[in-house]
Image (cartoon, rainbow, N blue to C red):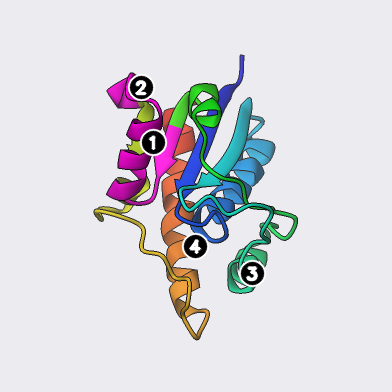
Amino acid sequence: MSTHLLFVCSGNVCRSPMAEAMAMEWAHVHGADVEVRSAGTLKLVDRAAAPKAVAVCREIGVDCSRHRSQPLTAELVHWADVVAVMELQHAIEVRKLVPSLPEDTIVNMGAFVRMSEIADPIGAWTKRPFRKVRDQLRTGVQALLEENR
């Protein structure tokens, strides 16, 4: 039975799509039985991934160009075995939707890189902040998937 992994950020146009694409690529390369989705707390619908996020993922051979945003819902949270959040506020939003969710279901991606959160690079003028987030997410995604294999 596959593991269901849900990445959550604010808009579902940068951090969580990057993480989703990286996780799908990792699962493909390692033959892991993982289903991956992503969603956002701002409830944006059908938006493309941020162009700089797509570009910096492409630099490492990961494609998130086909991504379309979707809002975080209780159904998605119930679907997931692991809900990986970028910020504390995202965990709070997940809990509001499903108060009975077991505590160990929510994982803070920042913890994998010894940070309290993965900062949102949206609005940055250059690709540098996007690359920093990409690299943090890459480390976190690999660790998370190894842990949940």
- The reply to whether the C-beta atoms of the residues labelled 1 and 3 are less than 8 Å apart is no
Residue at 50% from the left image edge and 84% from the top image edge: 126
Q: Does residue 144 sit above or below 58 in this rendering?
A: above
Q: Secondary structure at mark 1?
A: helix
Q: Secondary structure at mark 2?
A: loop
Residue hosting label 2: 101
Q: Which residue is mark 1?
A: 94
Q: Is residue 9 left or right of residue 25?
A: left
Q: Position of residue 9 (x, y in %)?
A: 45, 51
Question: Is 78 or 64 nearer to us in this picture?
Answer: 78
Secondary structure under tag 3 reads loop
Q: Which image quarter is the N terminus in?
A: top right
Q: Who comes first in sequence, dot 3 or dot 2?
A: 3
Contact check, label 4 and label 2, Cβ < 8 Å: no
Residue drawn at 60 percent across, 38 percent down? 37
Reading the image, the residue beneath label 4 is 134
Residue where numbered disc 3 is placed: 59
* Count of number-bearing discs: 4
